[in-house]
Image: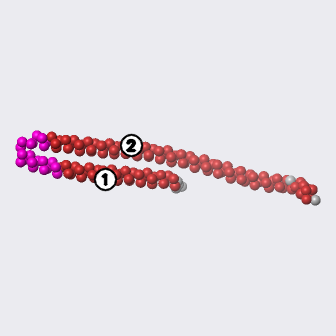
Amino acid sequence: MNEQEPVYITKLREHIDQKIEREIGSLAISTSNQFAKIDKKFDEVDRRFDQIDKKFDCIDEKFNQIDEKFDQIDEKIDQIDEKINRMNIDLDGVDNRLDRLESNVIDIKINIEKIEAHIGRYEVRSQNLEHIILEDHKSRIINLENKVFA
């Protein structure tokens, strides 16, 4: 038996997927910007090495500036790694919550099926009771009608 996924679960998954896509897109843009900045920094480094060849008296100062730039790049890469790790943790939490929701929906579905079965039995009983009452008390009802409408 193949059960269809409830609409609200489907919509929730779509919403989560859209949110994840937006976050990934944002992260991709941020990462792309960071790599563009890194490329610019490497261009700056190349120009500085050219200047070092021309001006030997500035070598120590220029290398210190390059080291600082690399430290900044390392910090930014570490920040990106931290964001990715947090996103993975958040996704694991979402998966766990979805699993619990799915389990709860299955339990609710089973309970609703039981309730519907009870309702069906009570409907049959009420129809049978009406028929029994009419048949057992038909003569009394006719006598009462004759007295009331006489």
Question: Is residue 98 among the parts visible in the rendering?
Answer: yes
Q: Position of residue 74 (x, y in %)?
A: 24, 43
Question: Can you say which quadrant of the picture contains the C terminus?
Answer: bottom right
Secondary structure beneath dot 2 equals: helix
Q: What span is in magenta?
A: 43-63
The verdict on residue 47 being magenta is yes
The verdict on residue 103 being magenta is no
Cα gap from disc 2 to disc 1, whole angstroms: 21 Å
**Which residue, given by chain and number where applicable, does mark 2 sit on?**
89
Q: Relative to the observer, which residue lies in front, 73 or 103?
A: 73
Question: Is residue 139 among the parts visible in the rendering?
Answer: no
Up-down relation of residue 69 to residue 29 (above or below): above
Q: Is residue 130 left or right of residue 80?
A: right
**Which residue, given by chain and number where applicable, does mark 1 sit on?**
29
What residue is at 16 percent from the left and 49 percent from the top?
Answer: 44
Q: Position of residue 104 (x, y in %)?
A: 53, 45
Q: Position of residue 121 (x, y in %)?
A: 70, 51
Residue type at the position of mark 2: Ile
Magenta stretch: dominant secondary structure: helix
> Which of the two discs, 2 and 1, sits closer to the camera?
1
What residue is at 30 percent from the left and 45 percent from the top?
Answer: 80
Residue type at the position of mark 1: Ile
Secondary structure beneath dot 1 equals: helix
* Mark 1 burial class by Cα count in 10 Å: few <14, some 14-19, many 20+: few
* Mark 2 burial class by Cα count in 10 Å: few <14, some 14-19, many 20+: few
Question: What's the mark number on residue 80?
Answer: none
What residue is at 79 percent from the left and 54 percent from the top?
Answer: 130
